[in-house]
Image (cartoon, rainbow, N blue to C red):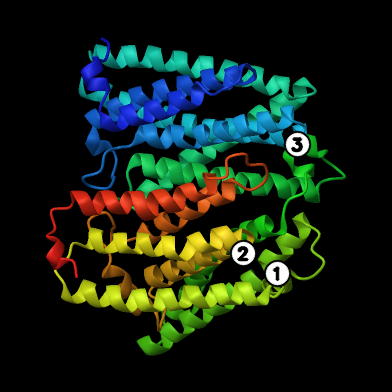
Amino acid sequence: MAISPSKAMNGERAVVLIFVLRVLFSLPLALLPHALSLSLLSLFSLVVEIRVDDSPSLFKTRPGASSGIILGAVTLPTVMLSKLIQLSRAVSLQQIEIGELEHMTMQFWAASACSCGVLIFLFIVTWCAANNKNPHFSCSVWDAKFSLSCVILYSAVCCISLATISHTGFNTALKLLWLLCHGFATVKLIQHLLSTFPFCASIGEANLVTSGLVLYFGDMLACTISKVCRLLIPPELVSIRYGIKRSEIGIVIQGVLLGLLIFSAVFKFLIHLWEYFWGANNSESRERKEIWRSLIFLTSLGFIMIAVAPSWMMIVLDFDVHPVLWIFQFIFSEPFKRLSLCIYWLVLIYASVLRFYHISKNSKIERILLRKYYHLLAVLMFLPALIYQPKFLDLAFSAALAVFLVLEIIRVWRIWPLGQLVHQFMSAFTDHRDSDLIIVSHFSLLLGCALPIWMSSGFNDRPLTPFSGILSLGIGDTMYELLTSPCKRGQCF
């Protein structure tokens, strides 16, 4: 039983497929295996999305949102493939080394493996549910045959592509194992995300987040293994990329995120340990317990961000000074421009927060519209910095992301004395797209502006690429929302 075209296609799927086709038609012949794998991944994700939409009660996703599986599955591989097209042009012009192209090839296959692993997991869940409901459901058998064919062809193309950039069969086997670990880790992480934070995201959003995290931290792990075990394990056995020099700012960004990941796990462990030994039978007042939790929070955060994370940075890159001192040296290398930019940002943030928070409390304006004015604020903040101080903006984005993550941890754990205040403030800007468990709107805006800039580092022959996130989110998305909203313009302010 085949899927009818009218059922298979809607507006969102059509846009995604047009986007994928546009990238595929730009590929050189040397990247033909990658084009075939992306096509198979797109078809497989389309089948899985249709089946998941037929069984919406299987997963605890955000109410009112489409599953977005095809969008979440093909976004990262398509972006990596677009970067591969750029790098292939650079190699032909002898502007970069071949090793950078080979590293991006591994990143493309790792992103594809993450998406493919999640798709296989989703298909198995939906197929088992369909068979349990109706054992004679012939459509499930057709889906299984088609999906299995896609997975087999995808695996074969992947093996052939990796064999072309590997010197031995042993290298190819190690790389395939590395990709398999990416897929498995993504499946485990998306299961944990959907169960720990139910009704907070669609499946496509969860897939995109988990794939990005696994890809990013997998790259960090491979870099660390290559540096620490250089004498025991040749770097090419892990990844070809890690012998190539990385920038200090890129390592600082990775180190900050690694430190916050370690901190969240350590803080949770310390809190459970403290409650087990001292919290159960302790007759101290609630206020004193909150103070103790705050002290544990600040102590563990300070130790990890000042000692642990910088230690990792100095292992993977030879800093001349402590990374924290390097950050200050970088800022004060052009003190007038960079400090003036910081003052400009602080003034804008202070004025806008006061204004918009007052409006959110005393106006009937829709919150989704109010949040769009923060998108316009992002244009005012980031566009001048991107033009005049792009490297400093990279560092500032990582600092802002770290602050957002720390504030969200404070809000979720209700860390005294800021936890309740942060929760009340953030709740003033939430709507049906957020939940009480976790608020992600500010992360979406920040990462939407930052990721195109971060991914444009290195060789980039498209000068407008870094501006794409700021302009599309800050202007395009805002104008669309304002023009299509039923809100009367006189009530907005």
Of the image marks 2 and 1, the number of the one nearer the N terminus: 1
* Residue at image coords 57%, 40%: 462
The residue that label 2 is drawn on is 392
Q: Quadrant of residue 358?
A: bottom left
In terms of secondary structure, where does tag 2 sit? helix
Instruction: Tell me if 236 is positioned left or right of 112 in this view.
Output: right
Instruction: Tell me if 397 is positioned left or right of 170 in this view.
Output: left
From the viewer's perspective, is residue 115 above or below residue 269? Answer: above
Q: Residues within 10 Å of mark 3 (few under 14, many from 20)?
A: few
Q: CA distance from mark 3 to mark 1?
A: 27 Å
Q: Residues within 10 Å of mark 1 (few under 14, many from 20)?
A: some
Q: CA distance from mark 2 to mark 3?
A: 25 Å
Say which mark, if any, is on residue 95: 3
- Residue furthest toward the right? 231
Q: CA distance from mark 2 to mark 1?
A: 8 Å
Say which mark, if any, is on residue 330: 1
* Residue at image coords 58%, 51%: 454
